[in-house]
């Protein structure tokens, strides 16, 4: 984990070479997932999110080590939440028949792999129903404790529509960054809805 943090910090020093794109207020579509934001966020470039799937997006306000919203649209049966970057660390895969508690466990396990199992403890709690547009889903809370980095808290919204998982996750360092953007992040998560073609 220390290596990963040092890598990102060194990339911060090369900020002139990295381009973040502003996500202005309004409706934003990520594949079939529509979201609304009332404030500006910054979309991280792919080079900063090498664990993200090609169809996913990562937004941040203060840098992805401090806060981020991960938007994962339309995960299909048998796919992992994040991109596999190491053969040694197999990621869990999505099953369209997952129950709400299993979606939370799947997310917990996937994030644990992302941060590195040996140096992190990821917990989910507070599973509760949530309607996203015309579809039913769930909200749940996250805690990530790292042995050699900042601790994080977060909230995730998830729904399975047409056997695909749509997931929006807000994670930020505690206490300041998590509290600072929580209301705006919750508004984005709760606005999520699947846009059907036609």
Image (tube, rainbow, N blue to C red):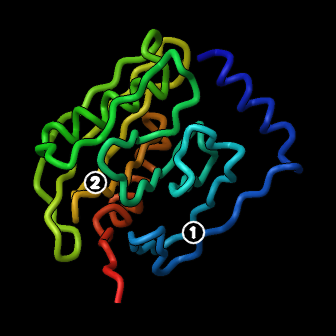
Whether residue 194 is situated above or below residue 15 in the rendered picture: below
The picture quadrant where one finds residue 162 is bottom left
For marks 1 and 2 on the same chain, the one whose residue lies earlier in the sequence: 1
Q: Nearer the viewer, residue 18 or 181?
A: 18
Total numbered circles: 2
Work out whether 1 lies above or below 81.
Answer: above
- Mark 2, secondary structure of its residue: strand
Which residue is the site of mark 1? 40
Residue 157's mark? 2
Where does residue 24 sit, x and y in percent of width and height? 58, 75
Residue 149 placement (x, y as % from top left) = 55, 20
In the image: residue 194, left or right of residue 80: left
In the displayed structure image, the side of residue 130 where residue 45 appears, left or right: right
Q: Residue at x 44, y 56 (%)?
A: 71
Q: CA gap, disc 1 to disc 2?
A: 20 Å
Q: Is residue 170 left or right of residue 86?
A: left
Q: Secondary structure at mark 1?
A: loop
């Amino acid at each position: 984990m220390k290596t990963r943090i040092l890598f990102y910090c060194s990339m911060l020093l090369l900020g002139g070479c990295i381009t973040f794109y502003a996500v202005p207020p309004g409706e934003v579509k990520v594949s079939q997932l529509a979201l609304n934001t009332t404030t500006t966020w910054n979309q991280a470039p792919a080079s900063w999110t090498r664990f993200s799937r090609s169809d996913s997006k990562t937004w941040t306000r203060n840098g992805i080590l401090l806060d981020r919203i991960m938007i994962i649209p339309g995960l299909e049966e048998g796919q992992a939440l994040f991109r596999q970057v190491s053969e040694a660390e197999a990621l869990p895969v999505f099953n369209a028949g997952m129950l709400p508690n299993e979606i939370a466990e799947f997310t917990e396990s996937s994030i644990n792999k992302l941060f590195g199992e040996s140096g992190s403890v990821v917990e989910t709690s507070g599973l509760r129903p949530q309607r996203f547009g015309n579809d039913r889903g769930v909200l749940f809370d996250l805690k990530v404790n790292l042995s050699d980095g900042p601790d994080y808290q977060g909230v995730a919204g998830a729904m399975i529509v047409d056997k695909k998982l749509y997931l929006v996750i807000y994670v930020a360092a505690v206490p300041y960054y998590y509290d600072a953007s929580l209301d705006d992040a919750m508004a984005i998560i709760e606005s999520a809805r699947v846009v059907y073609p036609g």
